[in-house]
Image: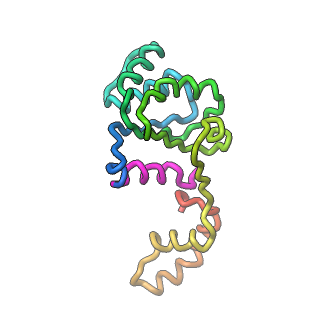
Amino acid sequence: GGVGKTTLAQHVYNDPRMEEANFGIKAWVCASNDFDVLTVSKKILEAITKSKDDSGDLEMVHGRLKEKLSGKIFLLVLDDVWNERREKWEVVQTPLIYGAQGSKILVTTRSKKVSSMMQSNKVHHLKQLQEDHSWQVFAKHALQDDNTQANFELKEIGIKIVKKCKGLPLAL
């Protein structure tokens, strides 16, 4: 982790141009390690309705999701998906297919298997930063623009820090 998948997804989700896409519904769900079908389905429903759902019945949750999404264009972000079992994803996806054409599901994951299993249309692989770019990011945030002497003294330490961060933007 730490390459910036969630941060990039947040920028997309909050981009003003998303308003032009006419998503009637926008929802963000953190799927994380425990990909329980009922739990994830409830999280999606709760993100859409902005209210808690105490139902323990998957069929009922899926029925509500189908009702809320039918004929509507939606953007759903599933953040940090680890589940690599296709059958679980297919069950979660069942009510999502009722959304209108133009609906999008954006998934962040560390696993190439997840993007393949979800039959993604477009996959963007984020890479670690090159060392020179890492230094630029670090220097922008850590060094004082107007104090040349202090910057000179800190540069040596900063270069060591950048090397230890191994190109991970969130570590910088």
Q: Is residue 165 visible?
A: no
Colouring used for the render? rainbow
Indicate the position of residue 109 as horizontal and vertical percent values.
58, 43
Quadrant of residue 25 in the image? top left
- Residue shown at 65% from the left, 29% from the top: 85
- Marks counted in the figure total 0
Residue at (36, 22) in percent of width and height: 67
Q: Is residue 13 magenta?
A: yes
Query: Vertically, is 25 above or below 13?
Result: above
Asked if residue 118 lies in the magenta stretch, the reply is no
Residue ID at (48%, 39%): 105
Up/down of 156 relative to 130, above or below: below
Q: Position of residue 92 (x, y in %)?
A: 52, 26
Residue that protrudes farthest toward the front in the picture: 101
Q: Which residues are magenta?
A: 1-16
Single out the residue that lies furthest toward the bottom. 149
In this picture, residue 105 sits left or right of residue 109:
left
Residue 121: x %, y % from top left: 58, 44
